[in-house]
Image: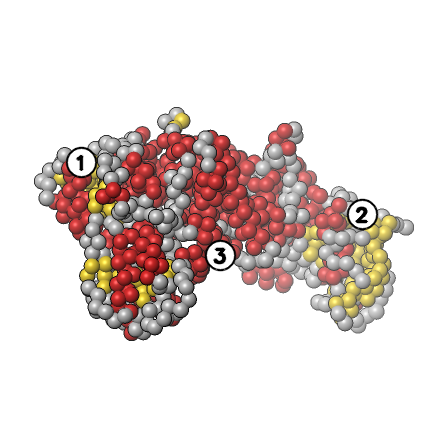
Amino acid sequence: MTHHQENESVKHMNRRIKIGSTVAAGLLIISAVAGCSSTSTGTAAGTSGKIGKIVYIPGLTGNPFYSTVSCGASGAAKKAGVDFATQGSATFDVAKQTEIVNAVVASKPGAIMISITDPKAMIIPLTKAKEAGIPVIGIDGDLEDESVMVSNIQADGIAGGELAGDALAKLVGEKGSVMTIDNATGSLVSKARTDGFAKAISKYPNMKFLGIQYSANDTAKAASFASTVSTTNPDLVGIFSAETNNTEGAITGLREAGKTGKVKLVGYDTSDPIIAALANKTLDGTVVQNPRGEGALGVTSAIAAMKGEKVKRQQSAAQVFATPENYTTDNVKQYIYDANCSA
Amino acid sequence: MSNIDELKTASTDATAPTASSTATPLDTVGATMSPRSRTIRRMTSSSPFYMSIVLLVLIAVFSIVAPGAFPSIANARNIITDASTLMVMAVGMTFVMVAAGFDLSIGSVLVFGGVCGSMAMTWMGTDNIGTVLVGLLVSMLGGLAWGLFNGFVITRLRVPALIATLGSLGAALGVAQIFTNGNDVRDVPLTLIHISTASFLGLSYLFWVALVVVIIGALVLRTTKFGRHTYIVGSNEEAARRAGINVRRQLMMLYAISGTLAGLAGMMSLTRFATTTIGGHSQDALTVITGVVLGGTSLYGGIGTILGTVIGIFIPAVLQNGFVVMNIQPFWQQVAIGLILIGAVFIDQLKRRARDRA
Amino acid sequence: MTHLLEARGLVKNYGHVEVLRGTDFVVDAGQVVALIGDNGAGKSTLVKILSGVIQPDGGEILLNGNPVVFKSPIHARKFGIETVYQDLALAPDLGPAENAYIGRELLRPGFLGKLGVLDKARMLREAAETFTSLGTDVKDLDAPVAALSGGQRQSVAICRAVMWAKGLVFMDEPTAALGVRQTRRVLDLIRRVADSGIAVVLISHNMPEVMEVADSIQVLRLGKTAAHFTAEDADLDKLVGAMTGSIEVIA
């Protein structure tokens, strides 16, 4: 381990209070058991040869995006007759994901699909997987060491952020102040989104970017940011929230402050309440990725890698901007997440 | 207790007790002060008093620095609404901590309660105030179940509270995730959403719920036998037991209260966000404990008031709001709250040492 | 003649160790009886039996001439027998008055009482009366007990016991942790308690103190009553002799 990587993971550990990290062990066991028993897709026994089980490790469980990736992958695996399982932690945490990766590698699966929690800290555990001959497919995020993964399937976060920025600028008439609500520093995926957003806003001379508030994935905190800034800063015309929990929180915050519609809100990713918010126009739009497609593409890439076929190193899935007007159209609908695998 | 010197004196010099004529003042229990000035002194030396000054200073500073933005009714309403859910849990935590206990599980019990409530409402399939009341009841019962579980593990299996509730912090979240397949439950009745947008006297119903919980909690802790027994158990458990107080039953009820209030908070959170926010509550217990300790409740039990807790919860809430208003880099919020917490406990330790030396 | 409390032939074994081997004990109202003996003589076992903490393996206890069995300290309390423990069993964060009512809180009359609301004013008043009647001047019955001196705390614990005792108070080494002047105050208090008609059983190591305050002194040795003195005919040599076994006197 280089010093650099060590520092990175130590820093991450320290961010939580000691008690929190002690809890990790307990939560890990429980969530792993839950994840394992509930989302395993069994297939007829006798998957032969080198085509082993594919395990997907999401950034955290219960997130609609990751759950929909899992649905898409599970469907594709079933079609191909390959065993598939999802194993994840309840919180977005490098240490917990590392433990899960180590456990999964020890179980010798055929291939790993992973949505990494950190582009540096996850290099070591995933290198172990690579050394064990297990191909690793990235979903929605690459490692800084690009030699570890066979392929990375990712929507372009910068492009998505710009999409959101341009849409918000249009909604507010290209003038006024805007802010961003993000989970935490350290995630490359979120950073791409917020960078893309800031880049788009900087194109408009009459717009001002106020900066980023971090919610640590706490919906209530996101609500508090939205209500506070919207009531205290008369220049605020728009908010960009980079993740689903923050969007849900910001919807609540604006509603509680009586600023719904007056302050425009644009999100990233979707969930049932976010779709409901589009329907009742408490949300003005959200960037939608194609997690189902990414999951399915991940499985076909994993199978190809297990067979020794060549897989394209960088693959991407398209994104669209869903609005109250267009979210019911077939074009957008196919992108909308479905965490419960009902389709 | 007395120091070593006194012990030595007792064993060696007690053979020659001094005359009693000069010793009269020693027999006086308490200082020679008028009752009124004593009451005032006690109030002004209490932690809630210090902390309410800290709170007022924070409000004053933010009002001066951001005059057009921070001090407004709308912004006060923001802070109050934000604090409501935590406040409900903090009342339960105060009870538990006054009895020298600890409840780390409340964040997960909140999620569990919300999940149970929303599942019950979905299962009923109706959409009226009755549906919501059933959801509320189920949510609180879900919290009660974990509270009783905590109480059982602590009083019967004799597992320390810190570990017992650390265990149920994991277990309650795990069970909630098993129920929901790890995904947030997101179909809640429209009635609930209407409640979340409605208000009474300009303030959200969530605030009124929190206010009722705070008032009842304060009255029970301050004026009833149950409250008094809570202080005694926290102050000297052995003394409570020898005096015939059923310590196990008392602790059991305290954890049940904490769990039930966390269940209620789960329903409040569900009402607010129309989703169970499973991933967002791992820090709730620490946030609540921070507030309760800031409000003067002792980590060793025996000391604490609901009024102090109310002040203690508002300090981080106001601090966060003020920093966001001033658009200060968000990381400073954590630094400030951490330092205030350490400072508050430090002052408390100084006072305690001074008191015990008397 | 019937006595307030009388124990006859008490036996207690812990495994093969005979701690009490037929111990007798007598105390009458208004008397201070000191119980002395070397470590392991069986003092604390005897007091534990008499206050209901443990049960004897043999012998009987008579209260006002009637045989009784104390199932627990709480049960013994119902017969008017209180104990001041060496650790005092006070809640340090509560005030003297609050401590006086631990486990026996008074409720408000009527509906509020049914809700469990305390009658704080009455408890404060009645505790103040007791404290004053025992000559303990109480100025601040609300201040935490932890802020009081060792002697004041001892006074609070004794006053509490006396407040509830209808016949007898056991005191386990009440002056062990006190300075000279505080010891004096506590001994005065013990005397006043006895003068009020309550019997006091005092366990102590301190011979001069015992001779000063006690009406009678019972010496235990190896689980048996070794000697019984009245205050007048006790002196240090006799007491030590009885404790160590160099003198064999049964009064």
User: For this view, does C181 lie left or right of residue B130?
Assistant: right
Of residues B261 and B4, which is closer to you in this image? B261
Closer to us: mark 2 or mark 1? 1
Mark-to-mark CA distance, 1 and 3: 48 Å
Residue located beneath label 2 in the image:
C29
Residue A135, quarter of the rendered image: bottom left
Of residues B198 and A268, which is closer to you in this image? A268
Residue appearing at x 31%, y 30% in the figure:
B73
Amino acid type assigned to the residue bearing label 1 in the image: Leu
x, y (%) of residue A288? Answer: 24, 46
In the rendered image, the residue lying farthest to the top is B201
Closer to us: mark 2 or mark 3? 3
x, y (%) of residue A152? Answer: 23, 61
Residue located beneath label 3 in the image:
B167
User: For this view, does B357 lie left or right of residue A124?
Assistant: right
Mark-to-mark CA distance, 2 and 1: 93 Å
In the rendered image, the residue lying farthest to the right is C1
Residue appearing at x 74%, y 49% in the figure:
C75
Residue appearing at x 54%, y 52% in the figure:
B150
Which color scheme is applied? Answer: secondary structure
